[in-house]
Image: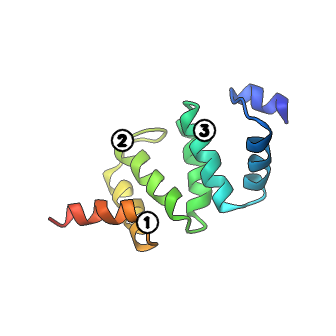
Amino acid sequence: MQGVLALAGLELGAEERALLCQADAGDAAAQAEIGQCCFRAGRPAAAVYWFNLAAAQNHADAMQCLGQCYAAGTGVARDDNLALMWIAKAAAHGHRIAQHQMAGLQR
């Protein structure tokens, strides 16, 4: 696995490698966290990949992150409609930041 991580340009410690295994096994929370790791490492397209996997399992944090990515065009083409859709879905799943964002749109 270390060779693959080096090719991807990611330096992960033992804890992150274990998290990556969980994410690869389908754990939505781990997928969202790996998405955050990729985002922090300057790999936004990889982050979007992991956020999409987690969002497909109704992970609210991943949905909100996807909304932000689409709103800014980070890792994906900018798309206001998809940004709003993902933020609204996150809000519907109880994500407080997304709820605040949606409330701001209604003013």
Residue 51, placed above or below residue 45: below
Q: Quadrant of the C terminus?
A: bottom left
Q: Amino acid at mark 1?
A: His
Q: Quadrant of residue 45?
A: top right
Q: Which residue is mark 2?
A: 72
From the viewer's perspective, tell me whether residue 96 is left or right of residue 25: left
Looking at marks 1 and 3 on the same chain, the residue that comes earlier in the sequence is marked by: 3
Looking at marks 2 and 3 on the same chain, the residue that comes earlier in the sequence is marked by: 3
Tell which residue pokes out farthest to the left in this image.
107
Q: Residues within 10 Å of mark 3 (few under 14, many from 20)?
A: many
Q: Looking at this view, is 76 or 61 the one in front? A: 61
Q: CA distance from mark 1 to mark 3?
A: 21 Å
Which secondary structure lies at badge 3? helix
Q: Which residue is mark 3?
A: 38
* Coloring basis for residues: rainbow
Q: Position of residue 19 (x, y in %)?
A: 74, 49
Mark whose residue sits in front, 2 or 1: 1
Q: Position of residue 98 (x, y in %)?
A: 37, 61
> Mark 2 and 1 residues: CB-CB less than 8 Å, in contact?
no
Q: Amino acid at mark 2?
A: Ala
> Mark 1 and 3 residues: CB-CB less than 8 Å, in contact?
no
Residue 102, placed above or below residue 19: below
Q: Which residue is mark 1?
A: 95
Q: Position of residue 97 (x, y in %)?
A: 37, 59
* Residue at left offset 62%, top offset 57%: 53
Q: Amino acid at mark 3?
A: Cys
